[in-house]
Structures are given as structure tokens and as C-alpha cells.
Image (cartoon, rainbow, N blue to C red):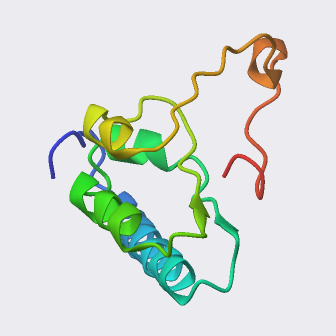
């Protein structure tokens, strides 16, 4: 796999990567279902842009979500480093500036919020 290097003989991290990939694909399938059913007013795949930037998700899959969504449903793709193809296809693009972040004072990611 591209980008993964290890000195260890323990390759259990590969199982975690497979689980992660399955989870991401499952989340995309759920987003597609919600967007096309039209029962929600807004769908927010939180922090999806970094995954696109790192090629963990195919950009074409997300552009398909944009194209297939019902007109009255808002799709909010959050996170840094949105690919240009996604920004070009979006109705609105907002760039937020970080003023203060918990990591600056040693507070790590929290399960259910950042993870």
C-alpha cells in the first residue's frame, strides 16, 4: 500500500486500515442514501476533505454525491484541504481561519468529536 512504511514485523495495522476503509465506504453509502431519499435537510460528512486530499476516498465518489443529491438537501463537506475539483463543483466554499485549538495546549483528539 502506498504511503505506509513500518519497521515492525507486526502487521496488525493492516487490519485496522481495512476496517477504516470499510467504515469510510459505509459512511459514504449512508450519505448517498440520505441525500437521495431527501428526508434530511442537511447531510454533513464531517472532516471528509482531508480524506479526499490524502486519497483515502475517491474524489469522483464525492462529486457523485453532489450530483445525485436532492435539490432541497444541503451537503456540507467539512475539513481542510478540499480538492479543487470538489471546490469547483460546490455552490459555496468557505475558508475558516484557526484562532485557537485544543492541540495548542496539549489536548488531543476526542473520540466521538475528532475521531
Closest to the observer, 55 or 63: 63
Residue at position x 77%, y 13% from top?
A: 104
| Image quadrant in which you'd find residue 25 | bottom left
Camera sees residue 14? no
Decide if residue 61 is on the left or right side of residue 80. left
| Image quadrant in which you'd find residue 53 | top left
Residue at position x 34%, y 43% from top?
A: 86
Residue 43 locus on image (x, y percent): 63, 66
Decide if residue 84 is on the left or right side of residue 106. left
Closest to the observer, 74 or 8: 74
Residue 89 locus on image (x, y percent): 33, 45
Decide if residue 82 is on the left or right side of residue 70. left
Residue 57 to residue 106: above or below: below
- Tell which residue pokes out farthest to the front in this image: 71
Camera sees residue 7? yes
Residue 72 to residue 88: above or below: below
Residue at position x 48%, y 83% from top?
A: 36
Closest to the observer, 11 or 75: 75
Decide if residue 16 is on the left or right side of residue 35. left
How many labels, in total?
0
Residue 84 to residue 10: above or below: above
Residue 49 locus on image (x, y percent): 45, 42
Closest to the observer, 3 or 112: 112
Residue at position x 35%, y 60% from top?
A: 62
Residue 92 locus on image (x, y percent): 52, 38
Residue 68 to residue 53: above or below: below
- Tell which residue pokes out farthest to the left in this image: 2
Amino acid at each position: 500500500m502506498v504511503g505506509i512504511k513500518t519497521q515492525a514485523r507486526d502487521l496488525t495495522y493492516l487490519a485496522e486500515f481495512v476496517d477504516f476503509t470499510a467504515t469510510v465506504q459505509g459512511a459514504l453509502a449512508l450519505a448517498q442514501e440520505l441525500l437521495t431519499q431527501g428526508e434530511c435537510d442537511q447531510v454533513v460528512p464531517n472532516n471528509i476533505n482531508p480524506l479526499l486530499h490524502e486519497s483515502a476516498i475517491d474524489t469522483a465518489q464525492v462529486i457523485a454525491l453532489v450530483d445525485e443529491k436532492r435539490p432541497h438537501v444541503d451537503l456540507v463537506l467539512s475539513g481542510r484541504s478540499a480538492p479543487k475539483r470538489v471546490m469547483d463543483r460546490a455552490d459555496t466554499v468557505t475558508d475558516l481561519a484557526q484562532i485557537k485549538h485544543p492541540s495548542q495546549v496539549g489536548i488531543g483528539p476526542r473520540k466521538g468529536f475528532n475521531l
